[in-house]
Amino acid sequence: MATAWRLFYRDGLRAVGIDTLLAEAGVAKMTLYNHFASKEELILAILDKRDLEFRASLLAQVAAAGPYPVQRLLAVFDWHEGWFASEAFKGCVFIRALSEYPEPTHPIHQAAWRHKVAVKAALTELCAVAGARDAAALAETLSYLIDGAIVTAHATQSTAPARSARATAAQLLKLDAAA
C-alpha cells in the first residue's frame, strides 16, 4: 500500500500500471491479487486510508487551535499551509481522482467525492460553531477557496495560496458577523 500510495500520488492513478507497481514494491502479482481484486480496488483502499489520515490530521490541528471558534476555523487554512510547505506535497489525490475518473458513477470518483463532502461537512460544523448565519453556504465557499488554494499551490510550489485563502476566509467571517 505504501508503494502504491507513493507511485499513485507522484505519477497519477491511471498512469501507474500494475507491472510498475509490482516491480517497485517487490511483490508477486498473486500477492497483490490475494489482497485486492483489481487495481481499482487498490486505489479505493488507498483513497479510503488517505481520507481517514487527512481528516484526522486536519481535525487535530483544528482542536489544537484552542477554544475560539473563528481561530479553529482558520486553523484549517494553517494546516493547508503546512501541507503545501512539505516536501511531499504533490497536490490533492482526491482532486486528481475526480479528474482522472470523471464519470460520477465510477467508484473511484465517488470515493474522492465522499472525501470532499466529508471535509465540507466538517467545515459546515466549524462555521456553525463560529456563528455563521448560513453555515452550509459559508462552508461551500470555503471549500472552493481551499480547492483553489490546493491547485494553485501545486502549480506554483508556493504556500502563498494558503495564506491568501486564510485572509479571504477571515474577511468572509467578518462580513458574515457584521451582516
Image (cartoon, rainbow, N blue to C red):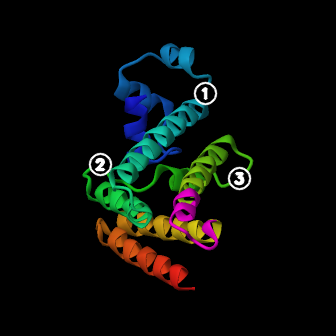
Height in image: 178 above or below 5? Answer: below
Q: Percent from the top left, x then y, of residue 103? A: 71, 52
Q: Any magenta on residue 132?
A: yes
Tell me: 47 left or right of 160: right
| Residue occupying image coordinates x 38% and y 64% | 71
**Label 1's element?**
loop
Quick one: quadrant of the C terminus?
bottom right
* Closer-to-camera residue (160/5): 160
User: Looking at numbered disc 3 in the image, what kind of residue is underneath it?
Assistant: Glu
| Residue occupying image coordinates x 57% and y 63% | 128
| Residue occupying image coordinates x 62% and y 43% | 111
- Rounded to the nearest whole Å, what is the CA distance between mark 2 and mark 3? 28 Å
According to the picture, the residue beneath numbered tag 2 turns out to be 88
Tell me: 114 left or right of 5: right
Tell me the number on the disc at residue 38: 1
Mark 3 vs mark 1: which is more N-terminal?
1
Pair 2/3: label in front = 2
Tell me the number on the disc at residue 145: none
According to the picture, the residue beneath numbered tag 3 turns out to be 103
Q: Percent from the top left, x then y, of residue 27? A: 40, 18
Tell me: 167 left or right of 30: left
Write the start and end of the magenta stretch as one range. Answer: 124-135
Mark 2 vs mark 1: which is more N-terminal?
1
Tag 3 and tag 1, C-beta contact below 8 Å: no
Q: Quadrant of residue 22?
A: top left
Q: Quadrant of residue 6?
A: top left
- Crowdedness of circle 3 by 10 Å Cα count: few (<14), some, many (20+)? few
- Rounded to the nearest whole Å, what is the CA distance between mark 3 and mark 1? 18 Å
